[in-house]
Amino acid sequence: MALLVGVLGVAAALASGHLVAGLIDPNASPFLAVGNTFIDLTPLPLKDFAVRTFGTADKVVLLGGMAGFLLVAAVLAGLVSRRGPLPGSIFAIALGLVAVAAVYARPDLGQLAVLAPITSLVAGLLVFRGLHGLALRQAVAATEPGQAAEGPDRRKFLLGSVGVAVGSGLAGLGGQFVAGSVDVEGSRAQVSKLIAHYPQPDIAPGADFARQGTPTFLTSNQEFYRIDTALSVPRLRAEDWSLRIHGMVDRELRLSFDDIAKRQLVTRTITMTCVSNEVGGPYISTANFTGVLLRDLLAEAGIQPGADQVFSTSVDGYTAGSPVSETIDPGRNAMLAIGMNGQALPPEHGFPARLVVPGLYGYVSATKWVTDIELTTFAAKQSYWVPRGYTAKAPIKTESRIDIPQGLSTVPAGTVVVAGIAWAQTKGIAKVEVQMDGGPWQEAELTTEVGKETWRMWRKEFDLKSGSHTVLCRATDSSGYTQTADRVSPIPNGATGLHTIVFVAQ
Ligand SMILES: Nc1nc2c(c(=O)[nH]1)N[C@H]1C(S)=C(S)[C@@H](COP(=O)(O)O)O[C@H]1N2
Ligand SMILES: [Mo]
């Protein structure tokens, strides 16, 4: 019974906070806010461990861990409160204050948002004390001589418990419903119609070696890698979005989605890469992005002399900073994108609008759900990952990856195709070489070049006897630079080293 009192108290707290958050801002839900704050406070080594171990499932693991912790804590709080409600009450207040602090500290939540964790605190405390009182009365009654076990007090406690459980369930669902009632899909459908008016660039048929086992040249929106710090994807309608461009500019701009949609939109094929990608890793994808060129928007605002950083902020408080020179470079297609592969951006890739800057890792450039661009200096402002150990400037490194054969796989002996991808965004790939079993470096066949801002696929055939084989690849970009064999980890500005695969021919 003590156990039930603790668990129901926590359930009531979480659910009531969730309901209030649904009305104000879904991210004010105490559970999510604490999770998000935890992510922001996570020291780099732990974050890196989480990404390495759990990949993109790291958030599910975090939420699951928090739920487990809360359950155990609630049970313990109930058990230590058997004699009196004081320990559990202290626990309820402490948890509530943690949630209040987490919501208060979130850069993306307004003042009103603290109402959600305050509701949780009050509801948790009231439910805990209420049920505790009923439980105690019935425990005392049960010890009185002549009292049946099924006395009126026991019935009251049971009714109270069921009431709280049902109420919590309804409040939680209600919160989910209110938060989900923002019609993002309807808004996306409208934007997709607009994007469909613009033709998609033709990708040369020889642009990939997908039949040999490389990725397809364009990555579908479903398969596009996803990296962000958001525990719940911001739900924003295009109608409610606006972009402010300010700071060291001649004219501050405030653009609605309509202002963007009315312009002549352009589509560019761009390969994005995450700095967290390990050698041989999966965090690289290519899409046709449709939107407006950042250099046009920034020219309208008028960049003042001395500004060297384009500092962008997402609706969820995430920030990234790109050098001004790269964003206005006429040879580079830095974009405010609203379309991806012929459709509106998917919510998890930044609907309604995001930035894409070819040649820069995503963490310093590709702000999703972007609502604010400030022209400033690198000396004046640090973006999200910089105080967390990553460098402020991070051009994408020239790298390559073997996709086939897969590591530790077995292939038929004889003719073996080795194939993969190489990338050096904004420079372009000039050459890929492959080394088999310590032999000479041999040049691979390259696919038709689509552009300098995208990846390029390669392949090389070998005649192999049965046995174990080791193969390496290395890329050279059009500046003449050959990727280094020195192994470094993704921190502070991108992994290097040669991708090496061991496989068996049989
Ligand atoms: N709002 C927001 N934008 C963000 C991030 C984020 O955490 N929040 N992560 C960045 C990083 S690290 C990368 S690699 C790219 C990934 O974009 P994608 O998820 O569309 O592939 O988004 C960038 N934009
Ligand atoms: Mo990233």
Image: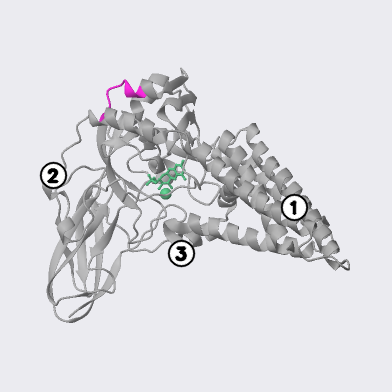
Is the residue marked by circle 1 packed among few (<14), some (14-19), or many (20+) residues within 10 Å?
many
Q: Is residue 462 above or below residue 395?
A: below
Name the spot of residue 59 as percent of width and height, x first: 49, 54
| Mark 1 vs mark 2: in front | 1
Q: Which residue: 43% across, 59% down?
A: 55
Badge number at residue 53: 3
Q: Image quadrant of residue 78? A: bottom right
Name the spot of residue 222 as percent of width and height, x first: 32, 48
Q: Which residue: 71% across, 45% down?
A: 123
| Mark 1 vs mark 3: in front | 1
For badge 2, the amino acid type reads Ala
For badge 3, the amino acid type reads Thr
Query: What whole-number distance in Å separates the C-alpha atoms at marks 1 and 2?
Result: 66 Å
Q: Is residue 302 visible?
A: no
| Residue stretch rendered in magenta on the structure | 260-266
For badge 1, the amino acid type reads Phe
Q: Tell me the quarter of the image containing the C terminus.
A: bottom left
Is 349 on the left or on the right of 100, as rendered? left
Query: What whole-number distance in Å separates the C-alpha atoms at marks 1 and 3?
Result: 38 Å
Towards the viewer: 391 or 504: 504
Q: Give the structural element (helix, strand or loop) at label 2.
A: loop
Asked whether disc 1 touches disc 2, contact meaning CB atoms under 8 Å apart, the reply is no
Is 410 on the left or on the right of 328, as rendered? left
Question: In terms of sequence position, does the residue under pointer 1 or pointer 3 come before the other?
Answer: 3
Q: Give the structural element (helix, strand or loop) at label 3.
A: helix
Q: Tell me the quarter of the image containing the N terminus.
A: bottom right
Is the residue marked by circle 2 packed among few (<14), some (14-19), or many (20+) residues within 10 Å?
few
Q: Which residue: 42% across, 49% down?
A: 227
